[in-house]
Amino acid sequence: MSNAVLLALVAIVPLVVLTLTSFVKISVVLSLVRNAFGAPDAPSGLVVTGLSLILTFFVMTPVAVDMAKAAAVPAAPAPAPAPGSPEAAWRMLVPAEYQPQLDAAERGIAPLKAFLIKHSAEKDRATFRELGAKLGHDVTGDELWVIAPAFVTSELREAFTIAILIFIPFLVIDLVVGLSLASLGLVSTSPQTIALPLKLLLFVAVDGWRLLLDSLLRGYV
């Protein structure tokens, strides 16, 4: 039973890793930019996912190095988690022979928690801290299960904010093209047929990909 639980935990690690990194915001922004063009298949979903992963590796490599260093350095035993807390429940699920690895993982996760705190809004952390307290948990605010949803919420808010700023000029192009075609009586002509080249021209003219990726990465400096 314990080994089955351990295998289940290992299976969800990739999903957790992608959620608790910059992949969330980067992938959402790139997907919404693709939709703003009005060409859902350019670039393809595979390209968007691949670029998101590459940029995520670029951002998270220093954090991963710090995590590896922290996990490799033995430290004084951490105080036992409070009975009934999620941390205590997780420890009960891990077989005794894997407890040393669990201790190393807890040391290594400290840099990740620092990253999540740095890039999550205080109001989001306060929200989930209050919700945790209302659910009957002893919450200090630095637990991973409190910081993680706050980080994802902050990342999604920033992603949609960036997407709105990108959508506005493209929306203006759509409106101008639509009104122009209507005034010329070309109601049978699809506005998207004319607007798409203009959007691409504008994006290329301002070096949009470089500016977009630069703004995304600078958000993690």
Image (cartoon, rainbow, N blue to C red):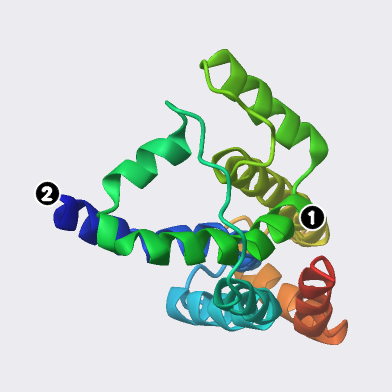
Q: Between residues 11 and 109, which one lies in front from this camera angle?
A: 109
Which callout, 1 or 2, points to the residue nearer the camera? 2
State which quadrant residue 75 falls in.
bottom right
Q: CA distance from mark 1 to mark 2?
A: 38 Å
Quickly name the residue at label 1. 118
The outermost residue toward the right is 206
Q: Nearer the viewer, residue 148 or 99?
A: 99
Task: Place residue 36 in its image quadrant.
Answer: bottom right
Q: Residue at x 50, y 81 (%)?
A: 50
Few, some or many C-alpha atoms within 10 Å of disc 2 (few <14, some 14-19, many ≥20)?
A: few
The image's mark for residue 126 is none
Mark 2, residue position = 1
Give the residue drawn at x 58%, y 67%. Answer: 108
Q: Secondary structure at mark 1?
A: helix
- x and y percentages locating residue 146 in the rendered image: 60, 38
Please tell me which residue lies in front, 24 or 5.
Answer: 5
- Left or right of residue 154, residue 145 in this image: left
- The residue depicted at 55 percent of the width and 70 percent of the height is 39
As drawn, 177 above or below 164: below
- x, y percent for residue 102: 42, 60
